[in-house]
Image (cartoon, rainbow, N blue to C red):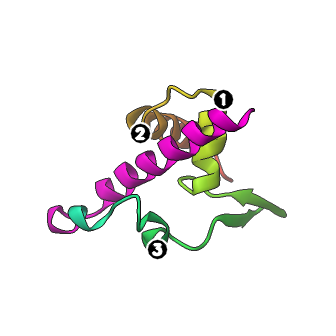
Amino acid sequence: MNRKQMKVIRRKAKTILVEWLQSLLPEGEKEKVSEANIFDMMPKQTHYYFRNQIRLSAWSYKWVIKKLKRNPDLTFTELNDIIMRNNGNKNIL
């Protein structure tokens, strides 16, 4: 991808992460989250270990960018639907 496209994707990823984090917080805390402090408020763990593999955690900055590279028109609700659909179909055991 070229620089201009990646710049747009990175900005959109930050806004999607702000929406995601605000959806987790109670009403009084939502206004404290912004694009300027999103990385301070996000979980520090970006990967997890599963079946002898290190995998990228959902809703990390890198994961959102990866999804937006495939489809730059995705929104927060569409990404959330993708996760909910995938969680219902997987059998971990």
Q: Is residue 78 left or right of residue 22?
A: right
Q: Is residue 67 left or right of residue 20?
A: right
Q: Is residue 67 above or below residue 13?
A: above
View extreme (left): residue: 28
Residue 86, picture quadrant: top right
- Residue for badge 3: 40
The image shows residue 35 at horizontal and vertical percentages of 40, 58
Q: Residues within 10 Å of mark 3 (few under 14, many from 20)?
A: few
Q: Which range is magenta?
A: 1-29
Question: Viewer-nearest of labels 3 and 1?
Answer: 3
- Residue for badge 1: 70
* Mark 3 or 2, nearer chain start: 3
Give the residue type that dot 1 points to. Answer: Arg
Q: Residues within 10 Å of mark 1 (few under 14, many from 20)?
A: few
Does the stretch in magenta take in 60? no
Q: How many badges with numbers are in the image?
A: 3
Q: What residue do we see at 70% from left, 38% from top?
A: 3
Give the residue type that dot 3 points to. Answer: Asp
Q: Is residue 61 above or below residue 86?
A: below
The image shows residue 23 at horizontal and vertical percentages of 30, 53
Magenta segment, principal secondary structure? helix
Marks 3 and 1, Cα distance to the nearest angstrom? 27 Å
Marks 3 and 2, Cα distance to the nearest angstrom? 20 Å
- Residue for badge 2: 76
Is residue 55 or residue 65 the one in the foreground?
A: 65
Q: Give the SS element for disc 3.
A: helix
Does the stretch in magenta take in 18? yes
Q: What residue do we see at 44% from left, 52% from top?
A: 17
